[in-house]
Image: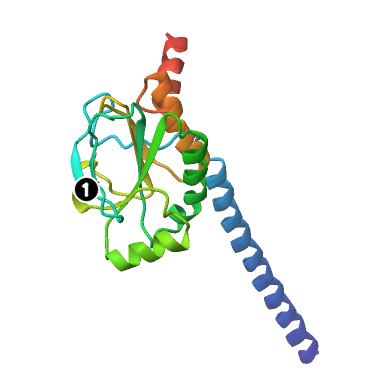
Amino acid sequence: MVYALLVSNLILWAVLIALTLVVLALVRQIGVLHERIAPAGALLLERGLKVGEAAPVVSVVDLNGHGRSIGAASEDGRTTLIVFVSPTCPVCKALLPVVKASRRSEHQWLEVILASDGPDEEQRRFVASHGLTEIPYVLSAPLGMAYQVGRLPFAALIDPAGILRARGLVNSREHLESLFEAQRRGVASLQQFFESRADSQAA
């Protein structure tokens, strides 16, 4: 009798542990799904630079030794997309194929520049391992400070006249493309566009 009770208790504990593991797995999956169905627009931070104003102009040198004035009016009439990344940022690494694809498909009107900060050798390994040698890659702490980058990956879109047209956190293709759409619509972010449309319909 005692043996049977002991066995039943062990079985109950095993079932309880199994259910706990199932619940933890479900909670993790809910988190993954939440990230996947997050709003399509890049998250615009309230603080910092204002869309529609002149972008800060920062002189930098890329890893190939070429000098650039990021934020200045474009000489070739193209819009500039600055994507701030880091070798230690997993989301940045996942976003890189999207950045490269956008650079190829939008090259007629868009120049892409990757920006980071940190040890030169680490950055060069990062560039080589992810096939980024064809994309201008700059190391500049002042650039990140000028654009008030606090979290990564972060992107800023500057039109040919040197005006900041969109900015925000980006972690997917939808977020990145939302910056392009925000520029086309003349808004700071798609969130702002949808909110203003909802307000006008409610009025």
Q: Is residue 80 above or below residue 1?
A: above
Spot occupied by residue 186 in the image (x, y as percentages of width and height): 37, 19
In the figure, residue 117 lies in which quadrant?
A: bottom left
Residue at the spot 18% in from the left edge and 49% down from the top edge: 142
Q: Is residue 174 left or right of residue 76?
A: right
Q: Is residue 34 left or right of residue 1?
A: left
Spot occupied by residue 18 in the image (x, y as percentages of width and height): 68, 70
Q: Is residue 203 above or below residue 174?
A: above
Q: Nearer the viewer, residue 86 or 149?
A: 86
Provide the residue designation for mark 1. 60
Quadrant of the frame with the N terminus:
bottom right
Q: Nearer the viewer, residue 154 or 190?
A: 154
Callout 1, which amino acid? Answer: Val
Residue at the spot 47% in from the left edge and 44% down from the top edge: 99
Spot occupied by residue 180 in the image (x, y as percentages of width and height): 44, 29
Spot occupied by residue 119 in the image (x, y as percentages of width and height): 27, 65
Residue at the spot 74% in from the left edge and 79% down from the top edge: 11
Q: Is residue 26 left or right of residue 94?
A: right
Q: Is residue 62 above or below residue 20?
A: above
SS under mark 1: strand
Q: How is the image coloured?
A: rainbow
Q: Nearer the viewer, residue 139 or 197?
A: 139
Quadrant of the frame with the C terminus:
top left
Residue at the spot 36% in from the left edge and 41% down from the top edge: 155
Q: Residue furthest top?
A: 203
Q: Is residue 201 above or below residue 139?
A: above
